[in-house]
Amino acid sequence: MSDLYGDDILLWSKQQAELLRRMAAGERVDDQVDWPNVIEEIESVGRAELRAVRSALRIAMQHKLYLLTWPNDPAVHHWVVEVTDQLADAHEDFRESMRKEIDLASLYRRARLSAEAHMIALSDQCPWSLDELLAEGEAVMAAEKSGAYHPTAAAAAIVTAKKPGPRQRAETGPNPEAQAAMPAWLKRAMRGRGPPGG
């Protein structure tokens, strides 16, 4: 039985599911069930779901950092789509039991390191809470269901929430009025340095 698990997991899973159905119906076939691998597979389902939520949050944060850093870049619309898609997926797949398993600071650190490979130095502290990210994903899903969601409007909302970007500040100098109006989470996200070589 264990050989089949390694050789053809699809066939193994069908056979094990049938054995479990027969057991549930009262038939005594428990000695035929590949218990160690059945247990491992059941545990792996939860791990896979958790891994998917963590991955979606990390990718969304990475693209949020791109948007915050380069709000006028030609790739803005692509980044917005990544943020909204990933946060919608995270919201949809998130279960409250996952909360204690999600280390947002660690996910943010990985997103920041990926973003910094392409751009400026960013804050060590995650500027978003888990609830803020999940709420944003929920809003995207609600807008999509109502037909009100449009990527261009989403891009404009994200980009205009942060003006001017680091590239403009590096070129034109600090804008005290814009910095004063900057949301608190954005101030936490950035150190105010220009892009590499700027």
Image (tube, rainbow, N blue to C red):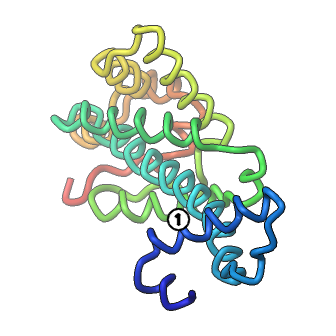
**At 50% across and 91% down in the image, what residue appears?**
3
In which quadrant will I find the N terminus? bottom right
- The type of residue carrying mark 1 is Lys
Q: Which image quarter: residue 103?
A: bottom right
Q: Is residue 37 above or below residue 20?
A: below
Q: Nearer the viewer, residue 6 or 123?
A: 6
**Residue 67, position in %: x, y?**
35, 38
Q: Secondary structure at mark 1?
A: helix
Q: Is residue 177 left or right of residue 167?
A: right
Kindly identify which residue carries mark 1.
Answer: 14
**Residue 4, position in %: x, y?**
48, 84
**Residue 32, position in %: x, y?**
69, 81
Mark 1 surroundings within 10 Å by alpha-carbon count, few (fewer than 14), some (14 through 19), many (20 or more): few
Q: Nearer the viewer, residue 173 or 79?
A: 79
**At 61% across and 70% down in the image, what residue appears?**
16
Q: Is residue 60 above or below residue 44?
A: above
Q: Which image quarter: residue 47?
A: bottom right
Q: For the view shown, which residue lies furthest in the bottom direction? A: 3
**Residue 93, position in %: x, y?**
59, 43
**At 70% across and 59% down in the image, what residue appears?**
21
